[in-house]
Image (cartoon, rainbow, N blue to C red):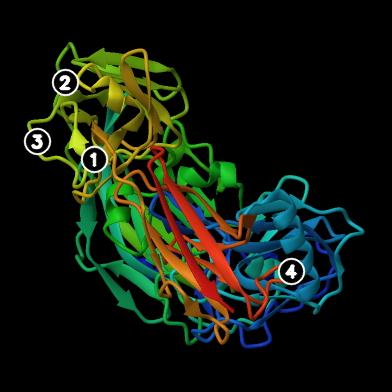
Amino acid sequence: MTILYRLKNRAVLLIVATLFSGTNTFAQYTPPLDCALDLSANYAEVRTNRYHLGIDIRTKQREGLIVRAVADGYISRIGIAPYGYGKAIYITHPNGKTSVYAHLKRFNPEVEEYVNGERYKGKKHSFNIFTPANKLPVKAGDQIALSGNTGMSFGPHLHFEIRETATQKTLNPVPICNFDIPDDVAPKFVKVMYVATDTIKGVPIHSKPKNILLTKLPNNIYEPTSKSPIEVSRHGYFIAQVSDAKNGTGNLNMSVYKIIQKFNDTVNFEITSDAITFANSRYAGSATHYVTQQATKHDTYILSKKQGNNLPIYSNIRNNGIISLNQGESGSIDMEIIDESGNKSYLAMSIIGGRKFEPAKPAQSILIAHYNKTFHYSANGATVSIPKGTLFESIFYHQKMSTRIETPVTTKRFSPIYEIHRPDVSLFSYYNLSINADSVPQHLRSKAMIAYRSSKGRWSSAGGVYKDGEISARVRSFGQYCIVTDTVPPKIKPSFIKGANLRNSSNISFAISDNFAGIATFNATIDGEWILFEHNAVKRKITHYFNDAISPKKGVKYNLSIEVTDGKGNKKVIDTWFTR
């Protein structure tokens, strides 16, 4: 049976009309922007080890576009933060959904006045408030804000989400909202790999992925470049590296909506990215091949389910997606990838059972950290406690002191560097790491923390506090750690000279930065009175806008004091003055 024959005669697994079943009381949502909705990112793209749980809409490379409510409802939550969503609005709708609008520049005048009043009342630069249903009602199409670039944003855009109100589970907005987003571009198979697998003492062992070169045929059909059947082991699974795009978009690395795998003409694995909670987002580190995912912009899905992967995106799973063939036995693999608009691509492969995968046996004394049990280990001054559910699968655990002698820049090291397992193993949540701190002088204990070295060689603070002779922190990466101290205060640089006349200026700003522990808090006063500043963590800047109703009035001299504190309590204060 040829590949093309099998494709032509495959059963229809899905039709576009039923791809996106769900309930809505709105026949059509109003677009959140007046311009064409050009996506720069779609739902469920994998970002390092989490999912992108909304869509990003381009705003013509600028800020200030009108953002509109997509349906009737009321503003139920407003958030302002230097990281994450920046300025964000949440609207609760009567159909059981909530829409989210993030990275905003400003809210509409009514919301801006209310929010700033509350921020001054609580003296809070960052802000998160839940509002009652009768406070800020909106109609579909009402202006709620201007688009911006706040929070963890590296270019002007609107991040938009749809959630279930009751559970806050995020939903794929494209099929639900039925926005006019032209898309007749079929998703692509970028790469396919095969991994042989076995278990030793209940611990899964995986071979190095074997690349399978592909050739694209007409009608979005792919096949292996080699005409010979793909040799597989007794047990193993496939990895599909896939991508998608929309008409005219510059992003060719969007996620696909659905992946279906058939083994010998029977579906044995299916992924549908239509509903993911924030609590489950970090399972992306288990759903994808972590090492390959870090080195590419394309989503790289494992077509097998790991022991501790509780994502709800899977269905029709047989044998956890594992392909089992005896030596010399023939079989077939068919894959289908589908985007939100129903565009599809296909891959068909003939496979044959080959030699059994025989991994090297570990030493009898090797430690096993089980994914479903809490694991404790202490050696040579470093102690770990890994709660059950943190690991995606059981592992043979490794820990040792490193031979490295380097020290993170601008800090002083007070412990050996410890290698805590391997950085290529992803984790779902935090574990506890404690390092003996006997070498830390008493006067520096409050300045001590744990530092982490990434696989790219970059050191960063992992936090931590001194207690009972140890520095302890909650961390969620394996890799290299040590104790360092930070005694250097933050830096503050004003955008104006002392005594400047700012009559014609719309704002005042300060660049703020820290060498290692990171900015923890800041405070600003004018003539002793608290004043509101916006914090942009990406740009490392705080800004006060003079259009604030409580801003300094013109024609007067003002004394301004800025205090910035880092994560280890080091403070920097500058006092200056200006006139209006």
Q: Nearer the viewer, mark 3 or mark 2?
A: 3
- Would you say residue 340 is visible in this rendering? no
Which amino acid is tagged 4?
Glu
Q: Position of residue 192 (x, y in %)?
A: 30, 59
Which amino acid is tagged 3?
Arg
Write the residue at 68% across / 76% down.
553
Determine which residue is flagged by label 2. 362
Q: Nearer the viewer, mark 1 or mark 2?
A: 2
Determine which residue is flagged by label 3. 404
Determine which residue is flagged by label 4. 112
244 or 127: nearer the eye? 127
Which tag, 4 or 1, sits closer to the chain's start? Answer: 4
Q: What's the CA distance linking mark 4 and mark 2? A: 62 Å
Q: Nearer the viewer, mark 3 or mark 1?
A: 3
203 or 392: nearer the eye? 392
Mark 3, secondary structure of its residue: loop
- Residue 361 vertical placement versus 164 (above, below): above
123 or 114: nearer the eye? 123
Return the residue found at the far right. 134
Q: What's the CA distance linking mark 1 and mark 2? A: 21 Å
Determine which residue is flagged by label 1. 233
Q: What's the CA distance linking mark 3 and mark 1? A: 39 Å
Which tag, 3 or 2, sits closer to the chain's start? Answer: 2
Question: What quarter of the picture does the N terminus occupy?
Answer: bottom left
- Would you say residue 484 is visible in this rendering? yes
Mark 1, secondary structure of its residue: loop
Q: What's the CA distance linking mark 3 and mark 2? A: 26 Å
Mark 4, secondary structure of its residue: helix
Which tag, 4 or 2, sits closer to the chain's start? Answer: 4
Question: What quarter of the picture does the C terminus occupy?
Answer: bottom right
Crowding around mark 2 (Cα neighbors within 10 Å: few <14, some 14 to 19, many 20+) is few
